[in-house]
Image: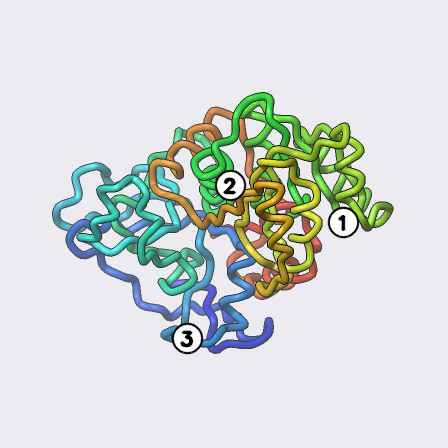
Amino acid sequence: MRAATLKAHGGPEVVDYREDLPIPEPAFGEVRVKIKAAALNRLDLWVRAGWKGLALDFPHVICSDGAGLVDALGDGVNQFAVGDRVCIDPTIVQPGDPALHSGLENQSRIAILGEHHSGTAAEYVVLPERNLMRMPDEFDFGEAAAAGLVGVTAWHSLITRGGLQAGESVLIVGAGGGVNSISIQIAKLAGATVYVVGSNAEKCRQAEALGADMTINREDEAQWSRAIYKLSNRRGVDVVVDNVGAATLSQSMRACRIGGRILIVGGTSGYDFEMNVAQLFARQIALIGSTMGPHRDYMAVMDQVFAGRLQAVIGARLPLSEARQAQELLAQNAVFGKVVLEL
């Protein structure tokens, strides 16, 4: 079968398009999906580079997100039929894990498609039945795929972990990434006032088009936390969404109101951060870590996508054979939103 794979860790040159991988067979409780679209995330770049302790079997199929048609059923599968249109929850939980019954199965030893588990950028993918959700007829496979990881991550952090309420204010640090572009929409859907810090005027304009109430161009306002303080009548915001990490957390804390909360959903600029602990306890700020989300949150956010209330922002669509070029677009921040691979 066709697939986009890594042949080793390294730069873009290790991304390999192949046509000779074996077609997988579903085991008990598993479903084989004929993939129509897969989507990249920044996670794909980190997996390609590798880190200490990441042990992959090469060739390793890339991508966490996907959508397609049910192609074959393993024994014991009763929720789906061959031909069903489905999208894919990227969080893999081991069968029998007690967390499966908790409703918060992401708070266990999970694997993510495309990371520790073979990914979705292949003609056929085999998955546990629980990882699938039916799609409406005629809904675009690329849009369904693009919403997956970023949608469940943003929904879980803002709604489940962050407890965002109507009337609150939210600052989203960064505009162009997949998580941030859908976080803007989720915050607006929840009834919040949304501030966005963008890296340039064009990204600020695009954030406004998604519903941001106020944007701050980082090129003009390097100390954007001061701008937030002024715009919020010297109060600060209720919630900050920060997936940048080391480079921005100090300003995120200054932009947060007394008693506010900061949702940390990534660290694209690095993980080591020197904190003013007095600022943390004196201003009663809550730091909330969040990663991925349970299947119920995946279904909740996808319901909103299918209803047209949320949309995955797609910056580029390429054929599977151009997976290397797709990763280069992502690495160069050359697109606003997600990069989709179509089969």
Q: Is 209 on the left or on the right of 230, as rendered?
A: left
- Give the amino acid type for the residue marked by disc 1 in the picture: Ser
The circle on residue 293 is none
User: Vertical placement of 110 versus 101: above or below?
Assistant: below
Q: Residues within 10 Å of mark 2 (few under 14, many from 20)?
A: many
- Distance, label 1 to label 3, CA atoms, is 33 Å
- Which residue is disc 2 drawn over? 154
Q: Nearer the viewer, residue 129 or 221?
A: 221
CB atoms at circles 2 and 3 under 8 Å apart? no
- Distance, label 2 to label 1, CA atoms, is 20 Å
Q: Secondary structure at mark 3?
A: loop
Q: Is 233 on the left or on the right of 260, as rendered?
A: right
The circle on residue 53 is 3
Q: Who comes first in sequence, dot 2 or dot 3?
A: 3
Measured as percent of width and height from the top left, residue 296 is found at: 34, 36
Classify the position of the N terminus by image quarter.
Answer: bottom left
The residue positioned 65% from the left and 53% from the top of the image is: 249
The residue positioned 15% from the left and 53% from the top of the image is: 28
Residue 317 visible in the picture: no
Q: Furthest residue to the right? A: 220
Measured as percent of width and height from the top left, residue 166 is found at: 55, 22
Residue 107 visible in the picture: yes
User: Vertical placement of 330 versus 60: above or below?
Assistant: above
Measured as percent of width and height from the top left, residue 130 is found at: 26, 44
Q: Who comes first in sequence, dot 1 or dot 3?
A: 3
- Which residue is disc 1 drawn over? 199
- Distance, label 2 to label 3, CA atoms, is 27 Å
Q: Secondary structure at mark 1?
A: loop
Q: Who comes first in sequence, dot 2 or dot 1?
A: 2
